[in-house]
Amino acid sequence: MQDFTFRRPASLADAVEALRSIPGGKLLAGGQSLIPVMKLDLAAPATLVPVAGLGELRGIRLEGSELVIGAGMTHREVGESAEVAGAIPALAALAGAIGDPQVRNRGTLGGSVAHNDPAADYPAALLALDATVVTDRREVSAADFLGSMFETALADDEVITAVRFRVPEAAAYAKFPNPASKYAIVGVMVARSPGGVRVAVTGAAPGAFRHEGMERALAADFSASSLDGVPVDAEELLSDPQASAEYRAHLVGVMARRAVEACG
Amino acid sequence: MSSLTLNVNGRSVTADVPDRTLLVECIREALGLTGTHVGCDTSQCGACVVLVDGRSVKSCSMFAWEADGAEVTTIEGLASDGSLHPMQQAFKEHHGLQCGFCTPGMVLSAVDLATHHADASESEVREWLEGNLCRCTGYQNIVKAVLVGAEAMEAGA
C-alpha cells in the first residue's frame, strides 16, 4: 500500500474543506471497499479524510413519508434499527444481508452509495424506494445520482450526508448472492406504493436499473404470475465467470417473482 | 507518523505507527499480540477478527488510526485470572478447532454474536459465521461450541 496521511475533520464543513484544498485527498467511510482497493494499489490517495464518525452523518428518523438514514450509519445499525424495521422492513433485511457481520460492522450506507459497486445491494433499494441522496450541498434523486459501474454524480469534494427513502406500502428484496462474497449476482427489489410499482435490479448490469416492463405488468396486476412472459433482455447484462448474461436475465425474473411473493 | 492511543484488553497503550498501518499490523507488530492472525489479508477469512468497542471487525480491513481512542479486545484479553472465557471454554470442551489458526477470529466473532444476541439459533450462528472461514473442521463443532458458549455467557452475565 502506498503511503498516505490522515486528515481528521472536526466537522462536515471541515471535511469538505479538506477534500477541496488537499490535492489527492479522498474521503474514507467504513473502508470495506476502499481499503482492499488501496492494498492492491488500485487507489493511492495521498490523504484520507475519515468521515464515518461525524455527528452530521449519524441518525435514522422518519420524516413524513420518508425514512432518512445518515450516511455514516453502518449496515449493522441499519439492519438492526427498529425505526427501519418498522418503516421499511425490506431495507433492514437488505442491510442485514450485506457481506458478513464484520463488513456490516464497518461498512456504511454513504460509502456503499458513493462507491456504487454494480453488485452492491443498496443501489437497488435507492431506485426501488425513489430515494434522494442528500449531500453537503444539494439533494439528488437516486436515478440522477447513480451512474454506470463505480460512477456517481458526486463531486470530488462532495460528501453524502444522508439518504431519504420513500416509505412504500410494501417492498421486498430478493438476492441471488455470490456464495463467497455475498455480493449480488442478481438482486431485485420490488416496491409497491400509491404512485405505482418499482422494480429495481442490481448485480445484473454495469449499473442498477429499473425494469419498466415488469413495473407495468405489476401495476396492472400485482402478482408473481403477472411477470410470466415479461421479457428480460440479456443484451445489456453482464457476463462473467460467475454467470452468463442469459443466466442473469433468467435470475432477474426469478428474483423479481420471489420479491413480489414476499411483498405479501 | 502519529501516536495513537488504544485501550487494548483493558490496558491503555500508545503506538507510534505510520498512518497507513492496519489495525492487525499494529496489534501484532507494534503491540506484540500475535494471537490475532493474518490469513487472507483480503477481508475474506476472518482470522484477524477482533472487537472494537464490542463489535467484531476484520482488523486487516481497518486502519489502526481509525481505532484511536477505542476499546480493542483481542483473543489475549478474553481469559481472566487464569480462567478461560466461557466461549473459549466451550471451544475447548466441544473441540471447536483442529489446527487452531482460525480460532481467535471465530471466538471473537462468536463473542460479538453472543453479547448482542444471546439466544441465537443454530441457523443464526451459521449465518453469523459467514465471515469466518475454517478449512479443517467442517464447522459442526464450531457451531456447537458457539451455542454452548453463548448459553454459558448468558448464565454468567
Image (spheres, coloured by chain):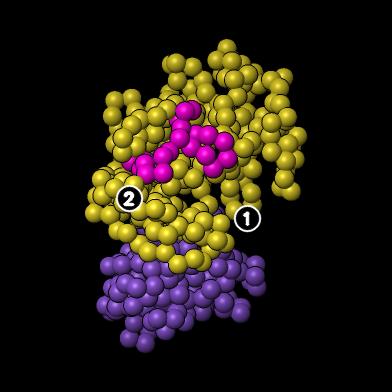
Number of on-image labels = 2
Give the crowd class for mark 2: few <14, some 14-19, many >=20 residues within 10 Å: few
Closer to the camera in the image, A31 or A125: A31
Q: Is the magenta stretch mostly helix, strand or loop?
A: loop
Closer to the camera in the image, B125 or B10: B10
Q: Which amino acid does label 2 sit on?
A: Ser
The chain displayed purple equals B
Residue B34 position, x and y percent, is 47, 82
The range drawn in magenta is A142-161
Query: Label 1, label 2: how many angstroms apart (C-alpha)?
Result: 40 Å
List the residue tagged with mark 2.
Answer: A21
Tell me: residue B150, above or below residue A94: below
Q: Which quarter of the figure has residue A41?
A: bottom right
Which residue is outermost to the bottom? Answer: B82
Q: Answer yes or no: do the residues labelled 1 and 2 have beta carbons within 8 Å?
A: no
The chain displayed yellow equals A
Residue A180 badge: 1
Asked if the magenta segment contains residue B148, the reply would be: no
Which residue is outermost to the top? Answer: A220
**Same subunit, tags 1 and 2:** yes
Tell me: residue B95, above or below residue B147: below
Give the letter of the chain under mark 1: A
Asked if the magenta segment contains residue A148, the reply would be: yes
Which residue is outermost to the left? Answer: A10
Give the crowd class for mark 1: few <14, some 14-19, many >=20 residues within 10 Å: few
Q: Is residue B30 toward the left or the right of residue A99 in the image? A: left
Q: What residue type is labelled 1?
A: Ala
